Amino acid sequence: MSLSDTSQHANCSAMSDVLNRIGDKWSVMVVGMLGRNGTLRFNELKRLINGVSQRMLTLTLRNLERDGLVTRTIYPEVPPRVEYRLTELGKTLQEPISALWDWSAENHHAIVDARAVYDAREDAITAETTRKVAYARG
Amino acid sequence: MSLSDTSQHANCSAMSDVLNRIGDKWSVMVVGMLGRNGTLRFNELKRLINGVSQRMLTLTLRNLERDGLVTRTIYPEVPPRVEYRLTELGKTLQEPISALWDWSAENHHAIVDARAVYDAREDAITAETTRKVAYARG
DNA sequence: CCGTATCCGATTCGATACTG
DNA sequence: CAGTATCGAATCGGATACGG
C-alpha cells in the first residue's frame, strides 16, 4: 500500500498510532543516533540528544522498545550498564527517517523565511487595525 | 547535509521545529490529501480526514500556510469558498512523507505484534509480583 | 461555508527527589 | 549509572457558541 493507493476508505487510524510514535521528536532523534552509532548507553544518548530530559528519554526508549524498534540490554554490573541498539525493524526505519531529516535540513531556511514573511504580513494587518482604531478614537 | 553528516556539534534544534510540524498527525494527513487531490476546499479536507475537528484543521492549515507549504485562496463569493493546495515546497515534502507512510503501512503489523509481546511480558511480571505479595500476606 | 473565540478537561513534560 | 515517583505548569484539543 502506498500513499496513492490509500483511498478515503482506508482506515487512517492504523497509520495514526504509527505516526504518533514516528512523528515524536525524541523518537526520531533516538533512532537517528542509534542508527549512526550502533550501540549507546543511556547517558550517552542523553548527552547526544540536546535538551532531552531524563524522564522523556526513558519514556521514549520504553516506547521504542515496546514497538520492537530498539533492544535494551542490561549488564548486571556495579555500576549498572544498559545498552540500547536498533532492532532489524528499527534499522528499516532509518531510511525514511533519514529522508525526512535530509528534507528538514535542506528546507529549513525556506520555512523560516516563509514564516518571517507571513508574520510580517500579520503584523502589518494588526498595525493597520490599530491605526484605524486610533483614528476612530482620535 | 544528510543524517550521516549531522555531527554531534550540529544544532539539532534547527531540526526540532521542522520535525514538530512534520511529525504532527494532522499536518501529515493534510499534505497527503492535498498531494493526492491537488486542490481541496476546507470542508472537503474535513470530510477526507477522519476525526479532525474544525479547530484543529484550521490551526493545521494556518501553520502549513505560515511555513510556506500550502496556499490559501479565498474566492469572495456567497457562500464563501476557500481552496487549499500545496506550494512547490509542499510538493517536495510529499516524497519523504510518502516514504514514511509506506513504511507505516508495511510495518504496522510488526509493531502491533511487538507491542502485544511486550505487554504480555509486562502483565506476567505484574502478575508474578502480585502473587508474591499475596504469598507474603497469606 | 469558513472560520474565530472561549471554555475547560485531558495530556504533556520539565523539575525535583529518591532508589537499587 | 540508570532509572522510578510525584507534582505542578503549560500546552493541547474537543465542544460549543457566535460572526462575516
Image: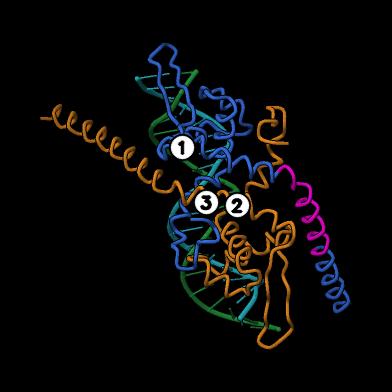
Chain colours: A orange, B blue, C green, D cyan
Residue A30 occupies quadrant: bottom right
First in residue order: circle 2 vs circle 3: 2
Residue at 47%, 54% (x, y): give it: B15
Q: Which residues are magenta?
A: B105-122
- Distance from Cα at disc 2 to Cα at disc 1: 19 Å
* Residue B45 placement (x, y as % from top left): 56, 27
Secondary structure under badge 3? helix
Residue D1 occupies quadrant: bottom right
Secondary structure under badge 1? helix
Pointer 1: what residue? B89
Pointer 2: what residue? A97
Pointer 3: what residue? A102
Give the chain letter at badge 2.
A
Q: Residues within 10 Å of mark 1 (few under 14, many from 20)?
A: some
- Give the residue type at disc 1: Leu
Q: Quadrant of the N terminus of chain A?
A: top right
